Amino acid sequence: MKDETAATPLLRARGLHKTYYLGRTTLEVLRGVDLDVARGEFTALRGASGAGKSTLLHLLGGLDQPSAGEIWFDGEPLGKLSGSALVKLRNRRVGFIFQAYHLLPELTALENVCLPARMARVSAAEAEARGRDLLARVGLRDRLEHKPYELSGGEQQRVAIARALVNAPELVLADEPTGNLDSHTGGEIIDLLCALRTERQATLVIATHDARIAARAPKVVELADGRIAGN
């Protein structure tokens, strides 16, 4: 018998539009995007600045809602989820890695990583064990008690990666994860993401204009003027 779960894309988007209204100005960012992302797949979203990469990533992860169209996560339409159900999905099944890191400045590296686990009501001991393991895995075993301002950009990005993985999400969404980093550090981040994806059997979608990431991704989706090229 065919495994229907395996055959169903983890993410499916159809007819996505996103329009912002800025006073009298209308900004149409996405103009009818269709996209499937298979389970365990590594997809790179490429395109120039302003092409709609970050907007699409935020919609796929339930951080924002489309103006039109629908997104299904594991066969379930995101548009029909209640606010609390959407929060739970984002917390437990989706990991976000932001270009600007978004680490809380008053918390240590370990506390930042543990935060999503504590929000998921994981015990303090278990959350700390996960956090220590992940920070060691990303090469920050000796930086657990450092606060963000005491870390380099590459180190902060590694903390953000560990935080995104602390609840073992099925889907990892990364927005320009090498955008603020030098070439050497950016290469290390790419290697780390690829290794952790394989190790944890996660689905990885990266929005980027970095050709090095596109070269590593088995699937590359090009966005131009709010549409997927070729569609």
Image: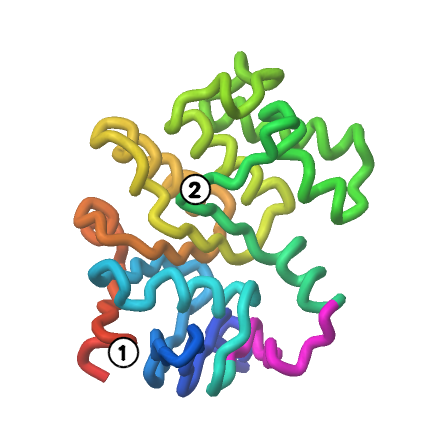
Residue 199 lies left or right of residue 153; in this view the side is right
Q: Earlier in the sequence, mark 1 or mark 2?
A: 2
Identify whether 191 is placed above or below 66. Answer: above
Q: Is residue 40 magenta?
A: no
What residue does disc 1 label?
227
Q: Is residue 74 magenta?
A: yes
Q: Quadrant of residue 106?
A: top right
Q: Nearer the viewer, mark 1 or mark 2?
A: 2
Check the picture and name the quadrant holding the C terminus: bottom left
Q: Nearer the viewer, residue 222 or 11?
A: 222
Identify whether 29 is placed above or below 15. Answer: above
Residue 203 lies left or right of residue 44; in this view the side is right
* Residue 89 in view in this figure: yes
Give the x, y percent position of residue 149: 50, 22
Q: Which residues are magenta?
A: 71-83
Q: Residue at x 72, y 70 (%)?
A: 83
Q: Which mark is residue 100?
A: 2
Give the x, y percent position of residue 68: 47, 86
Q: Residue at x 29, y 28 (%)?
A: 185
Q: Amino acid at mark 1?
A: Arg
- Mark 2 crowd level (few <14, some 14–19, many ≥20, 10 Å Cα): some
| Number of numbered discs visible in the structure rendering | 2
Asked if labels 2 and 1 touch by Cβ distance under 8 angstroms, the answer is no
Give the x, y percent position of residue 29: 34, 74
